[in-house]
Image: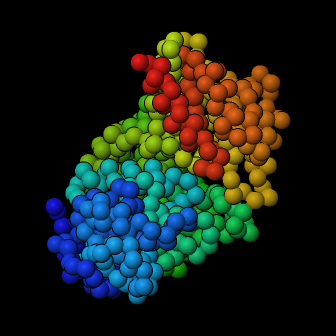
Amino acid sequence: MSVLWSTDAFVAAAGGRLVGGAPDGISNVSIDSRSIGPGEAFVAIQGPNRDGHEFVGAALEGGAACAVVQEGRTEGGAGPLLVVPDDPLAALERVGVASRARMHGAVVAVTGSVGKTGTKEMLRLGLSSLGPTHAPVGSYNNQWGVPLTLARMSAEAQYGVFEIGMNHAGEIRPLTRMVRPHVAIITAVAAVHIEHFDSEEGIAEAKAEILEGLEPDGTAVLNRDNQWFDLLAERAAEQGARIVTFGEHPAADVRLEHVSLGADGSSVKAVLAGEPVTYRLGAPGRHLVQNSLAVLAACRAVDADLTRVALSLSRFQAPQGRGARLELHHASGPFTLIDESYNANPASTRAALALLGQVKPTGRGRRIAVLGDMLELGDMAREQHRALLPAVEEAGADLVFLVGPLMQSLWEDLPHGRRGAYAANAAELQPILFETIGPGDVVMVKASLGTRLGPIVEAMKRYYAEQAE
């Protein structure tokens, strides 16, 4: 078993005391008893639906080295238990802070209304070509995901990459102060989670909180094409940050000169600090090209070998739920699924529709858009859904399937020739969609998590796997 933390160091960092024995060391840190591995420390945090203390016994039986529990909550197992005087989440935060303090490599943090996870994955890929790189799995970007990612970071890591998200003002500030990045990227600011804000400007201010955690002489990587650039640049200057910009704007430090968009990826020509850079991006989508410029800017800021980073981007693949492409097998022939089901907002939905437009159906196939409600848009919700119509038409969508009460406004404006079906919920839509899909089709699925189109994607994978047998 490789040791991530010595027992003494972990206990000291968490600020607790051991009861019922001492483990030989900590191999990893987990908050999920279902996937606990041998030698891992299980932190019994209070989740949105369940209290982790309920699963202490299961974690220990599953091979956990110890369980981090709150004083007075030691009933879950005989031990070893690491008892802390407060919420175990606070202990996890302390471990995260201690982990960051012992790591002496370069740290990059990413936020933005769209593109965080893809940018994080490009950074992981590029920096991993240079040395040991630590980054979160999935989208561990919230109040428990960030300290958990920190706690899992090896002291020997040369690079650390972190994703920081938010739904409300003030949520990024404590997380970025834990991460203490040398470079902070803000991919873009858009009307996402706007029901929790008075205006889009408020979202920009909330994203700018990431700059407050920058290390001295740190670098802010900002989107020169975004309408909130001036505000973000002002906030970066207030923090004493060096500002590096990216985009198509003539004044951008990393400037896109030309891009050839393809169904399987993009060929990119850019200028970085006056020097030409040409590279291949392995996943399709203009929005990914834009964020790859931010990756190059960040890597240059930490003195990474840009030639090797750029070469590595040819291997980039869109993450599951964020543009991943799959070939599935209809009884009469294959079709393509573009899985954009992880989440949705107006900006990311337009990007997903543009991606659909880049992929050419085969034979008599069609472009099929499956769109569900975009949530947390407040009073702007129906207007924002209706405003998707031009993007649907530009994508050349032959059929459009819509789910949810908010999408009804788009359905009302949708030309009859493009109408696939409308359903109040995903379960009602699924059989209609499955009956419609044919060989050669390109099917793109996009919606907010609460609309529950993700399970349709999983059901589609299972159903058409069985069809192929």
Q: Residue at x 44, y 25 (%)?
A: 465
Q: Position of residue 31 (x, y in %)?
A: 40, 65
Q: Residue at x 51, y 18 (%)?
A: 330
Q: Nearest the camera: 380 or 152?
A: 152
Q: Nearest the camera: 190 or 230?
A: 190
Q: Position of residue 448 (x, y in %)?
A: 62, 49
Q: Quadrant of the C terminus?
A: top left
Q: Residue at x 28, y 82 (%)?
A: 19
Query: Which quadrant would residue 454 be assigned to in this image?
Result: top right
> Vertically, is 109 above or below 355?
below
Is residue 352 among what the camera can see?
A: no
Query: Which quadrant would residue 196 be assigned to in this image?
Result: bottom right
Q: Is residue 162 rendered to the left or right of residue 100? A: right
Q: Residue furthest right?
A: 412
Is residue 81 among what the camera can see?
A: yes
Figure label count? 0
> Vertically, is 141 above or below 447?
below
> Vertically, is 346 above or below 442?
below
Q: Position of residue 463 (x, y in %)?
A: 51, 26
Q: How is the image coloured?
A: rainbow
Q: Quadrant of the N terminus?
A: bottom left
> Vertically, is 166 above or below 264?
below
Q: Is residue 434 rendered to the left or right of residue 183? A: right
Q: Nearest the camera: 447 or 300?
A: 447
Q: Residue at x 16, y 72 (%)?
A: 24
